[in-house]
Amino acid sequence: MSKTATSAKASSFNGAALAQRRNVARKANSRGLCLKVRAGNTNAQKAEYIWYDGLEGQKEIMFNEMRSKTKVMQTPLPAGSTDFPMWSFDGSSTGQAEGDDSDCLLKPVFSCPDPIRGENHVLVLCEVLTPDGKPHPTNTRDRLVNILDKEINAEEPLYGFEQEYTMLGSDGRVFGWPEGGYPAPQGPFYCGAGNEAVYGRPLAEAHLDACIKAGIQVSGINAEVMPGQWEYQVGPVGPLELGDSVMISRWLLHRLGEDMGIVCTFDPKPVKGDWNGTGAHTNFSTKSMRNEGGVKAINDAVDKLSKTHEKHITQYGLGNEQRLTGLHETCDISTFRSGVADRGASIRIPRQVEIEGKGYLEDRRPSANVDPYTVAFLLLETIFSRA
C-alpha cells in the first residue's frame, strides 16, 4: 500500500529496538495459566472482530497490521451473517486516530466459522469507519466496493492470490536457520521434503486446515525457495472475496503462530543477499479472457498495464524495491516487461494460455505485504479504464 493511501501512523509503535526485545523471547505454549471455569450461558457465542490498521510494512519486521478483539453474543448469529452489531475501538492505540477523538467504528462485512475456537464461534471481518460513519482513510475495501459497477460485474473478474510469507523465531532469525549462520544455498528447499529441507511445516499445515474449516477458498500450499519461507494460494475468487479471504487468512496465520512461538512476516526482503524475496503474485482474468479467443483481451490488458506501471508499483507494497531487482525471478522495479512463461517479467502469460489462446495473466509485481483490496482495485481500474 502506498504511504499516501493511509493516515495511520507508525511512530507510536517505535519502542525498544528489536535487538533489545530478543532477550525476552517467549516459549510456545507457556504464555498463561490454564483455568477451568463453570460456563454460564452455554449458548453464548464468541465473535472475533477483525480489522487491519493500515500499517503493514511500516512497523518493525516482527509486527503486522492485523487487529482483533472478542465480543460475546448472548444471542448467536450464524456464520456468514453480516448482521453482527457495529462496535468501536480506540483508534489512538492503533495509529488510526488522535487521542482527543479516538473512537473508530467497526462495521461487520464478512463472517465465517472460527476454526480455532470451534463450536458456534465466528470470525467477523470489519471495515473501519470514522465517528461520522464515513470510510476511514485506511479502509481500502470501500473503494473496491464502489468500483464494482454493472459492466465489471458482468465480466466476472476472478483472482488467484499467491501469498508468500517467512517464518521467524522469537529471536528474529528465520525459523529453523542455524544460530549465527546460514543454511545451505537455495536449491533443495522449494517444494522440498525431509527435516533437512523443510522448516515450519506444522504451522503451514495447521494454517491450511484452519482456512479450510473457516470456508476460505484456498487452493494449495508449498514450501518456497528460501528455507523457512512458505506460500499459500487463495482463489479463484471474485474481487471482494479475494480481499476478505486474504485478510482472514493472514489473521489466522498470525494467531496460530502465537501457539507455536513463530512470527510470520510479509516483509518483501526479510533476508538480504542471495535469497529470494517474498511476493504475492496475483493471477487475474475476466470472462472475455477465459472465453475462446480470450488472448486478445489478455494482450489488451497487458498493454494498459504497461502504461500504468508506476502507479501500480507505488501501491504494490512497501519495501518492494528490495525485492524487484531483476534477480531471483523478478523484473527490475523501474522496468515493465511481459512475456510467455517468463518469471523474470512484470506480467507473465502462462505457456498453457498461449497454447489454448485463452485464460489469465499473472501480475508478478505485488510484494507479500501488499493490500489485497488495493491489488484487486488497481487491476480493475486499469484494465476497465476507470482511472
Image (tube, rainbow, N blue to C red):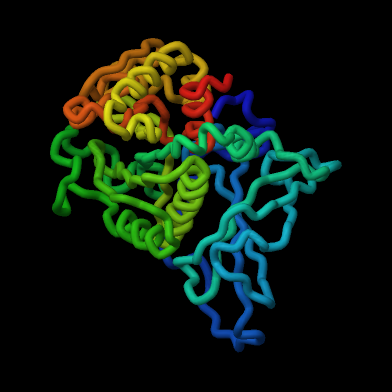
As drawn, 274 above or below 259: above
Which percent across, then down, holds residue 17? Answer: 54, 37
Which percent across, then down, holds residue 100? Answer: 85, 41
| Residue name at image x 67 percent, y 33 percent | 9
Is residue 373 left or right of 41 when viewed as pictured? left
| Residue name at image x 35 percent, y 33 percent | 281
Q: Looking at this view, is 56 or 80 the one in front? A: 80
| Residue name at image x 31 percent, y 27 percent | 294
Which percent across, then down, holds residue 65? Answer: 56, 43
* Quadrant for the C terminus in the image: top right
- Write down the quadrant of residue 270 in the picture: top left
Which percent across, then down, holds residue 366? Answer: 42, 29
> Can I make out residue 114 in this image?
yes
Q: Looking at this view, is 70 or 36 the one in front? A: 70
As drawn, 298 above or below 283: above
Number of numbered discs:
0
> Can I make out residue 54 in this image?
no
* Quadrant for the N terminus in the image: top right
- Write down the quadrant of residue 157 in the picture: top left
Is residue 128 left or right of 158 when viewed as pictured? right
As drawn, 282 above or below 323: below
| Residue name at image x 41 percent, y 35 percent | 368
